[in-house]
Amino acid sequence: MARPPRAAFVTLLASSLCLGLAGGASDVPASVQAAPPVLAPAKPEGAAPTTAGVQKALAGVLADPSLGKHHGVYVYDVSRDEQVYSSGTATPYTPASTLKLLTTVSALSTLGPEHRFTTQVVSAGKNSIVLVGGGDPLLAVKPGPAYPTRATLQALAASTAKALKAQGVTSVTLGYDASLFTGPAGNANWESNYLPEGIAARTSALWVDEGRLSAGMAKRADSPALAAATSFSKLLVANGIKVAGAAKPKVAPEGAEALAKVLSPTVGQIVEYVNLHSDNDGAEVLLRQVGLATKNGGSYAGGVTGVEQTLTKLGLQVGKAQIFDGSGLTRSNKVPLDLLAGAVRVAASKDHPELRHLLTGLPIAGFSGSLEERFSAGNAGAGTGLVRAKTGTLTGVHALAGIVRTRSGTVLAFAVASDSVPVPKTLDARAALDRVAATLANCGC
């Protein structure tokens, strides 16, 4: 099935999904972004989907041998607030990147969608300053074209230099403070090659460009905070401030005067970015921020505890889940499908407008993010433009969790996964998951 033209896509998205996209992905037209945030009709439209109907519709695709022995699906009627169908859900699954749904919905709930993280420079004695990290996952060295607009060290250095010169200071020593986050910077449950090969960064409350040493390169800094401070030092020099010696780690004095600061994008915008692009590093920073916001501390352990507490407060059952990171990189994570779909369900609920960015940042089938090149073959093409879902992929693991609106007008939250895919069947299994979502989107069942 050929993809509809972009103009048709606007109509499909606005009318069929009924999702308000204000503040959504950057490639979504402005006319759609301004659509009212209606998630489901006040009164359910059309015939209610039935367990028998959904079971019959999905029977063929769920029998696809490429899905392996351990696969399942969970479907929830958001319009009527009731479970519709589940199969293969007795045991949890390795969620891969669909775990980001739990991390990001928790960040929205605990911090609020309008919250911003502050990176600042403070005075630390005569001619001494400290660059203080506030846990901004998208802090950059200089401006770039990507959405959302990032805070930059370039802007911070210019403001700092101006403030110093106003005080008659033209030479300083520079310290840097990344003490907001605690505990190991890397996850003990990750594969041993993730950090040295740059697959993941060492999580820090102070970094730029997610710890990358240069644009387009996989290599990450061994100390992201030091790399950020070194870049900042060079920018100060470029702005007419001499920096004596190398930057050194230093905890900012309590109550120190702030000379300059820059603010991150909003948490809502960061959540959209993380889910649209499946940003592992951004998700790990948000995990630490959830730990801090729930007063469990800025470590991995604190973040996981904070996520579990937040999900529980949202009415979701976490007892069967085992969570070890924020991104889903570790295979040790085990999550029930109803919990993954539950994160989407509460974000779509009229009771939680603060969680809407979870939905507006989800990739759109055939058009954006990690689904841009998906839903293009066979029966899966019927879901193009109609499915919003987070992908999850590790070797032998494939998952999809998100939201659709059926032909009868019902809004469904769903999660489908397999963590037993034979490697030679990788593309076949991925296509099967796409067909599951497309079947739901086009189901009058």
Image (tube, rainbow, N blue to C red):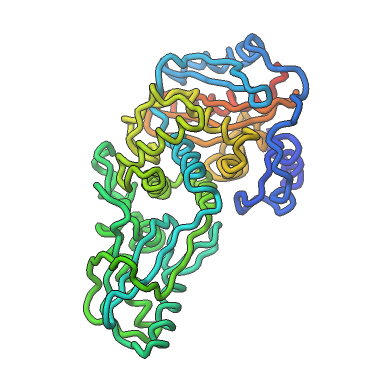
For residue 215, above or below residue 289: below
- Residue under the image location 68 percent in, 32 percent down: 1
- Left or right of 261 on screen, residue 5: right
- Residue under the image location 40 percent in, 43 percent down: 294
Which residue appears farthest toward the top when viewing the image?
Answer: 52
Q: How many marks?
A: 0
In terms of image quadrants, where is residue 375?
A: top right
Residue 169 image offset from top left, x and y in percent: 34, 87
Out of 351 and 188, give the one closest to the viewer: 351
Q: Is residue 75 visible to the viewer in this orientation of the structure?
A: yes
* The C terminus - image quarter: top right
Which residue appears farthest toward the bottom when viewing the image?
Answer: 168
- Left or right of 262 on screen, residue 189: left
For residue 120, above or below residue 368: below
- Residue under the image location 49 percent in, 29 percent down: 340
Residue 353 image offset from top left, x and y in percent: 62, 41
Residue 344 image offset from top left, x and y in percent: 56, 33
Q: Is residue 363 visible to the viewer in this orientation of the structure?
A: no
In terms of image quadrants, where is residue 325?
A: top left
- Left or right of 435 on screen, residue 218: left
Out of 159 and 4, give the one closest to the viewer: 159
For residue 93, above or below residue 223: above
Residue 43 image offset from top left, x and y in percent: 76, 26
